[in-house]
């Protein structure tokens, strides 16, 4: 598990819930400062067992969720040493000699959560029709430019317990139409507009949402995406059951 680190038991026990504010690790840098929503600063650890690191300091700049374009712009003008990049910039980046492109797997999964207590999503047939109507493999390849892998469950690729064969809803618009008819909405006639919510408005996720909307439209399901980038307000809306379908994610 590459994302796990060793921490001192005595520090965790003494600090309790505040350990995250005063972290102690085993690497060549020591925690210096955390300015919330701005940056995290680390300084060289002089007594590191493998010798003092070459760098005196590392600063991690913090950007709002969904601001990949802003982050990459800062990188391009020299304010950052590395950066994630917008999906639509990939081809240009791969052909430019001034960039060093690093690839690594990420234990991250994004998914839509359905509130099955709201109409018309109380219908199992409607929920299944939504799933069958979306071509997840094509979205991952064309929109994600090969950087995405269709999820087969809540456990992402690379994590213990992941089952690559657990895809219960392959793309089948025919099956989606059959389920809609069984639910009493042949070709989607009479079906209310399905409201989706997301907190992310960067280009990649927006392109995914557009693709989802088109696939649903192809079988007669009208979808409308709503966006709320205020994260506390977004979470509160979810907790209050106000979002029929919302995009969520977690990272290990």
Image (cartoon, rainbow, N blue to C red):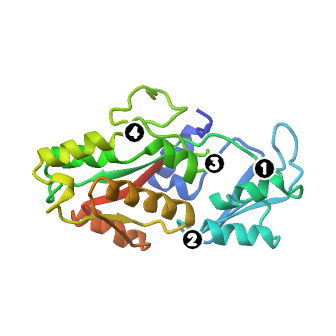
Query: Alpha-carbon neighbours of circle 4 within 10 Å: few (<14), some, or many (≥20)?
Result: some
Who comes first in sequence, dot 4 or dot 3?
Answer: 3
Query: Which element is circle 3 on?
Result: loop
State the mark number for residue 37. Answer: 2
State the mark number for residue 101. Answer: 1
Nearer to us of marks 1 and 2 is: 1
Residue that label 3 marks: 24
Of all residues, the one furthest to the left in this rendering is 184
Who comes first in sequence, dot 1 or dot 2?
Answer: 2
Alpha-carbon span between mark 4 and mark 3: 30 Å
Q: Report if residue 116 is visible in the image.
A: no
Alpha-carbon span between mark 3 and mark 1: 30 Å
Query: Which element is circle 4 on?
Result: loop
Alpha-carbon span between mark 1 and mark 4: 28 Å
Residue closer to the observer: 78 or 195:
195
Residue that label 4 marks: 154
Nearer to us of marks 1 and 4 is: 1
Who comes first in sequence, dot 1 or dot 4?
Answer: 1
Query: Which element is circle 2 on?
Result: loop
């Amino acid at each position: 598990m590459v994302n796990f680190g060793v921490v001192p038991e005595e520090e965790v026990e003494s600090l309790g819930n505040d350990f995250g504010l005063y972290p102690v690790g085993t690497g060549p840098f020591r925690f210096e400062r955390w300015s919330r929503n701005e940056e995290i600063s680390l300084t060289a650890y002089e007594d590191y067992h493998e010798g003092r690191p070459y760098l005196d300091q590392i600063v991690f700049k913090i950007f709002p969720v969904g601001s990949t374009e802003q982050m990459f712009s800062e990188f391009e003008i020299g304010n950052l040493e590395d950066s994630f990049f917008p999906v639509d910039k990939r081809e240009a980046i791969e052909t430019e000699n001034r960039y060093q492109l690093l690839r690594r797997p990420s234990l991250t999964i994004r998914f839509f959560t359905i509130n099955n207590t709201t109409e018309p999503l109380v219908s199992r047939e409607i929920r299944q029709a939504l799933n069958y109507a979306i071509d997840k493999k094509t979205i991952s390849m064309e929109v994600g430019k090969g950087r995405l892998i269709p999820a087969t469950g809540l456990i992402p690729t690379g994590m213990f317990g992941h089952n690559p064969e657990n895809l219960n809803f392959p793309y089948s618009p025919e099956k989606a139409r059959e389920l809609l008819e069984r639910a009493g909405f042949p070709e989607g006639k009479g079906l209310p507009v399905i409201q989706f919510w997301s907190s992310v408005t960067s280009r990649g996720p927006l392109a995914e949402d557009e693709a989802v909307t088109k696939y649903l439209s192809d079988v007669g399901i009208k979808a409308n995406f709503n966006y709320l980038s205020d994260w506390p307000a977004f979470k509160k809306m979810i907790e209050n059951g106000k979002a029929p379908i919302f995009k969520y994610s977690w990272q290990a």
